[in-house]
Image (cartoon, helix red, strand yellow):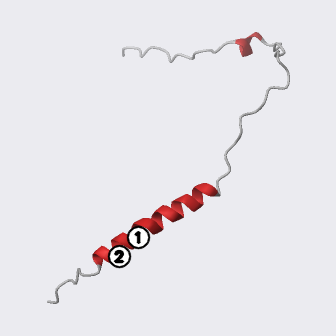
Amino acid sequence: MPQLDTSTWFIIITATLPTLYLITQLKLLNMHYYQTPQQKNSHKQAPNNHWQLKWTKIYLPHSQLQ
C-alpha cells in the first residue's frame, strides 16, 4: 500500500489561504449595499386607519383540556 506524500501540503495550504482571502475581498468589493433613505419631509402624515398607529399582538387560544 503506497504512503501518502505530505511534503507539498504546506505549500498548498499557504498558497490557498491568501487566494481565499483575495477572492473574499473581491466578492465584498462587488457587493452593492443599500444606502439609508433620506427623509424629504420633516413631518409624517398621519395614517387614516388607527390600526397602523400601533403594533398589535395576536395570541393563540389556550389549549383546552380534553
* Circle number at residue 62: none
Q: Nearer the viewer, residue 57 or 2?
A: 2
Q: CA distance from mark 1 to mark 2?
A: 6 Å
How far from the left and from the top, in percent, is residue 16? Answer: 41, 70
* Tally of marks: 2
Find residue 56 and report its image quarter: top right
List the single residue furthest toward the bottom.
1
SS of the residue at dot 1? helix
Position of 54 with respect to 40 (left or right) is left
User: Which residue does the numbered mark 1 point to in the structure image?
Assistant: 16
Above or below for 42 versus 21: above
Q: Nearer the viewer, residue 66 or 8?
A: 8
Above or below for 38 versus 8: above
Above or below for 49 versus 2: above
At 58% from the left edge and 59% from the top edge, which residue is drawn? 27
At 67% from the left edge and 46% from the top edge, which residue is drawn? 33
At label 1, the amino acid type is Thr
Neighbour tally class for label 1: few under 14, some 14-19, many 20 plus, Cα within 10 Å: few
Neighbour tally class for label 2: few under 14, some 14-19, many 20 plus, Cα within 10 Å: few
Quadrant into which the N terminus falls: bottom left
Q: Nearer the viewer, residue 60 or 47?
A: 47
User: Which residue does the numbered mark 2 point to in the structure image?
Assistant: 12
At 20% from the left edge and 83% from the top edge, which residue is drawn? 4
List the single residue furthest toward the left.
1
Quadrant into which the C terminus falls: top left
At label 2, the amino acid type is Ile
List the single residue furthest toward the top.
50
Badges 1 and 2: C-beta atoms under 8 Å apart? yes
How far from the left and from the top, in percent, is residue 64? Answer: 41, 14
